[in-house]
Amino acid sequence: MARLLLFFSLSFLILLLGCSSGDPGSSPGQAQDDDDDDNDDDNDNDNDNDNDNDDTAAPADPYIRDEQGRAMILHGCNFDGNAKGDSGLPQRTEADAIELAEVWGFNFARYLIFWARIEPTAGVYDEDYLDAVAERLDWLGDAGITVVLDMHQDLWGPFITEEWGGSDGAPEWATITDGWPYIPFSQMLGGWAFDYLSPAVIRAFDNFWSYDRHPELQDHYAAMWAHVAERFRDHPAVLGYDLMNEAWQGSGLLRYRDFDQNEYSAYNQRLIDAIRQVDADRWIFYEPTAFLTNQGGPMYVRVLDDPRDGPNRLAYFPHLYPLPIELAGGYLPEVDHTLDSWERHGAAAAERQSAPLLAGEWSMLSYFDDDNHRLWVNEALRMLERVSGGWSYWDCSSFQESADATFQAMVAASYPRRVAGTPVSYGYDPAAGALTLVFDERSGVSGPTEIYLAVSRDYPAGWTLEVSDPTGAWSSDWDEDAQVLSVWTDPNTPTHTIIVAPAAR
């Protein structure tokens, strides 16, 4: 609790200083829709609504779908934290990509890329770096893994300080701190994220968010993203683009709701519009500002518009890192309600935006012991099954370097990866060893439902299949090499239930 109080005290004092010193973030940016300004007057009515303006996106499908119309459920990991080095490339091999698919059953990866590597000089793009990215995307695609390109940043960028190598993201020419000092709170307080309170970091973000004062920063960022999208729009592995990792409000934190509805909404819309100039088809993944939403707090971004012809292809991509776990050193289920809050606010935000919900990162960074770790991981997985269309764990090293086989088996359990309809519910019950999928029939869908079965981990003694459709109206096929069960269901049955359970011993 002392660390929490210290964090908020420092946050308030430093951000107050920023707002009282001609800080560019103190002036609201251009709102997405000026007609909605009247709705901001209701901000004092702080109810459970995740946004106060009256915009509502048109109803849409809560799942990303493949070319056959099947709902995609994505399980995977971030590829990879060790990309935060000089090369900006994950220290992984083609064999590692194959292992993620064949051993762990993953069909998804969030691939880290960096603005500083792509555009080291303003307006000049490093095609050699993008060639190296393309090679690694080939590895993942050949392994059957779908990729979202994540424009990663931590603490704005690597050029604010040379004292500590924990920052990444923006190039030097885009790092405008106005001479504000770097204060190494991370070294004083024992946690890298405390450096977000450093005046230099706050100032760099504030200058980026202030489109009135520094339009060139967002304009370059949007043009850089358009270049990346044009480069990879036809790559078969690329599902879409994650606009920015864990955006920090800077001094806008003191105007949390207002910042979301103004500067941050305008920024996201600006990026969406730029990408759509060159790519009308790939999905665009957007994150909330990380502070509070990572811990299950609400998101107030205005409803975003996808200018493409046809249905929106925008996906909501928050992260999950419970602050109470960090403060306590482990999970205290009696008092930690982060998972409930994340589920409630995440589902509300996605519904309001009419966007699929997926978790871009999630992990438990502190725990009392292995049992405590597994307790939280199990509860997090069950929550994500209830509310999301998939996730990417932070990071792949947990499966390619970790020795905790029990944890690995929990996360890389059996799951449906393509559903020939609209999922009603799905989930793996580790106690019973049963995977249950319920889905509604949907017109226009072709192909079977595909279920990944982690046979060696979940069904070492074999498995049984039960389908609720009439006898003779459904069929199945088992691909031993891919560990994928395909089930063709009866198109005349409105709702289907598929259960895979352990064989009787």
Image (cartoon, helix red, strand yellow):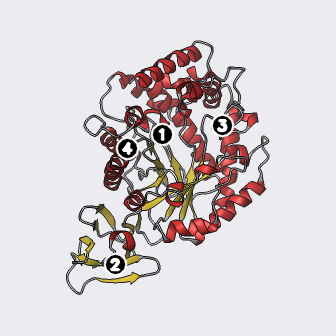
- Of label 1 and label 2, which has the lower sequence position? 1
Q: Name the residue under label 3.
A: 218
- Of label 3 and label 4, which has the lower sequence position? 3
Which image quarter holds the C terminus?
bottom left
Other residues around mark 4 within 10 Å, as few (<14) / some (14–19) / many (≥20): many
Residue 429 at x, y percent in the picture: 27, 61
Query: Is 184 positioned to the left or the right of 492 in the image?
Result: right
The answer to whether one can see residue 452 in this image is no
Q: Name the residue under label 1.
A: 288
User: Mark 4 and mark 1 in contact (Cβ < 8 Å)?
Assistant: no
Kind of residue sitting beneath label 4: Gly
Mark 1 to mark 4: distance in Å? 10 Å
Mark on residue 402?
none
Please give the name of the residue rendered at 46% of the width and 27% of the height, measured from the top-left corner: 256
Q: Name the residue under label 2.
A: 487
Mark 2 to mark 3: distance in Å? 47 Å
Foreground residue, 308 or 342?
342
Kind of residue sitting beneath label 2: Val
- Of label 2 and label 3, which has the lower sequence position? 3
User: Mark 3 and mark 1 in contact (Cβ < 8 Å)?
Assistant: no
Query: Is 286 positioned to the left or the right of 480 in the image?
Result: right
155 versus 5 height, above or below: below
- Of label 1 and label 3, which has the lower sequence position? 3
Residue 476 at x, y percent in the picture: 33, 83
Q: Is mark 3 on a helix, strand or loop?
A: helix
Answer with the quarter of the image where residue 211 lies. top right
Q: Mark 4 points at which residue?
A: 346
